[in-house]
Amino acid sequence: MWDIWETFCISLPCDTYLEHLPDPIPILQLFTHRYRNGTLAPSNTQVRSLTVEDALQAIGQAFTTLGKKDPRLQPLGKLDFRLSRQLSAYKKQDPPPTRVKPIPFPMIAQTVDLCCAANTPANPTIADMLLLGFYFLLCPGEYTFTDNEDAAPFQYCDVHLLIHSHHLNHYTCSDEELQCITYIGLEFTNQKNGVHGELVGLGKSGHPTWCPVHALLNRIKHMRHHHASPTTPLYKYFDRTWKRIYTILLTRHLHNTVTALGLTYGIQPHEISIRSLHALGAMALLCTQVDTDMIHLLGRWRSDEMLRYLHIQSFPLLAPLVSQMLNHGQYTMMPNHPLLGELGAAGANIR
């Protein structure tokens, strides 16, 4: 970001540190405008107001890192009024945020069944990753390969297996013990919003295939068989060499299913991506009336960002509300003023 700022200042020309300007705000406003319209943005296209705000904040932080005053701020530490109004105007101009829709689970189940039936090395791993992404409410970079530098995939060493309360060593336990697993867990290391060392675990779903325990055990068996190292990501599979499952590959499988079944569930292929699994997990919990605090915890949301993943278009979520409104909409209000009869009696007593 500092390189962009320096290039911008040279083009004016202007002192990079704004030291000789009595009022640096007009320069910052011009930078903000050009970043907004894409002239300075890396994408070369108009960006959202939040992206502009982040860029402006990065410049201010660079100034303070160099021991200089943040030129965006007033003496009391608030953002200058002119910049604040400019960013506010951009927010009003922003188009509505694009939200992926959660894919109803029958479509995930269909994709998983097709992958399990296909006789290719990659497809069983695709099926396992779909189930783990759904049940654990994982972000894409945690169970598939992405180019994102901040991606933190779960690895072979992050897996925990239990038979009731008995913890197993998944490197050395027997195949017979693996068949008796009742509880599986993933340990957070550097995953987004995770607490280092925290263990999130799930039990069996009751279905022989659509189950997180079944999916994770498939991964463990595959890695044990091919002598994977402890740091091998769970999305890798062995086919003469270790290969990866990419996000685009999972999205393509989901698109194929939505193309075939989407009309039944009111969804079109362009409305979904691999991020739909995160939304599906949250929606499934919401529709079963799980407390929203629990959904926050499992999805590792630290704010109301969770609401962006939830859609009130879900029939199971809204359909029961009509009868509940009918049954609970009949109530009596406690009066907060004297009754008319009491007023008359009080007047008579006074006379």
Image (cartoon, rainbow, N blue to C red):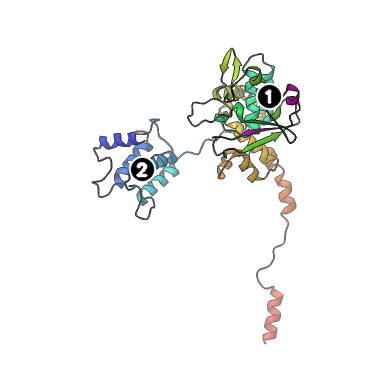
The quarter holding residue 91 reads top left
Position in image of residue 239 (x %, y %): 60, 14
Position in image of residue 325 (x %, y %): 71, 50
Q: Is residue 204 left or right of residue 52?
A: right
The quarter holding residue 222 reads top right
The quarter holding residue 40 reads top left
The residue identified by callout 2 is 65
Q: The disc labelled 2 sits on which kind of residue?
A: Thr
Location of the C terminus (image quadrant): bottom right
Q: The disc labelled 1 sits on which kind of residue?
A: Thr
Q: Is residue 141 left or right of residue 118?
A: left
- Magenta residues, as a range? 172-191
The answer to whether residue 260 shows anywhere in this view is no
Q: Earlier in the sequence, mark 1 or mark 2?
A: 2
Position in image of residue 196 (x %, y %): 57, 38
Q: Which of the two residues, 156 or 282, is positioned nearer the viewer here? A: 156
Spatial CA distance of label 1 from label 2 is: 50 Å
Tell me the crowding category of disc 1: few under 14, some 14 to 19, or many 20 or more residues within 10 angstroms, Cα based: few
Q: What residue sits 55% from the left and 39% below the top?
A: 193
